[in-house]
Amino acid sequence: MNKPIAIASALVTSVLMVVVAASSDAHAQYYSAGGGGGQTATPQQLQECQQLNIPQGTCSDLTILAKKRLTSAESTTYGNAPTGSGTAMLANISDPNSALGQMAIYVGALGAIFGGVAAAFFLKGRSSKQVTT
């Protein structure tokens, strides 16, 4: 092995080792046993966790926000119903104001446009004259 290649390899290896050693502690700010980012809950957060029925060991600002988001989603008109968002995709195909009616109109228009262009190219190609060389 060449001496310059060996020196370059050693230099790159040492730089990578320094980078890996410096970045290995970056996960510590996101880890904690309770899932709260290593911070202790304030008395206001503990009170709010008690109102939201969150266990004391997992009480943090993240769990409070997650619980509020969940209760907000469940309190909407449709909640987590198995019927979905309430937009009936396959209802009233003939109604141009329904979702499927609008989609059928768009698909039909795009089909006519692209079909017309394809037919024009096909007819133009069929009507061309053969060139002899």
Image (cartoon, rainbow, N blue to C red):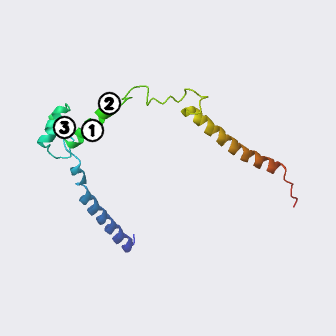
Task: Give the mark nearer the N terminus: 1 vs 3.
Answer: 3
Which residue was labeled with disc 2? 75
Question: N-terminal of the two: label 1 or label 2?
Answer: 1
Q: Residues within 10 Å of mark 3 (few under 14, many from 20)?
A: some
Q: Nearer the viewer, mark 1 or mark 3?
A: 1
* Label 3: element kind: helix
Q: Are marks 1 and 2 in contact (CB under 8 Å)?
A: no
Residue under label 1, please give it.
66
Tell me the kind of residue under disc 3: Thr
Q: Nearer the viewer, mark 1 or mark 2?
A: 2
> Which image quadrant for residue 83?
top left
- Outermost residue on the right side: it is 132
Instruction: Calculate the distance from the C-alpha at mark 1 to the C-alpha at mark 2.
Output: 14 Å
Q: Quadrant where the N terminus lies?
A: bottom left
Dot 2: few (<14), some (14–19), or many (≥20) neighbours within 10 Å?
A: few
Report the number of numbered marks: 3
Q: Residue at x 16, y 40 (%)?
A: 45
Compared across the picture, whether 51 is left or right of 85 comes to left
* Mark toward the viewer: 3 or 2: 2
Residue under label 3? 58
Q: Secondary structure at mark 2?
A: loop
* Residue at 32 percent of width and 30 percent of height: 75
| Residue type, numbered disc 1 | Ala
Horizontally, is 126 left or right of 29 in the view? right
Residue visible at 27% across and 38% down in the picture: 66
The answer to whether residue 43 is left or right of residue 114 is left
Q: Residue furthest left?
A: 43
Vertical order, 114 against 99 (above or below): below
Check the picture and name the quadrant holding the C terminus.
Answer: bottom right
Rendered location of residue 77, percent (x, y): 37, 29
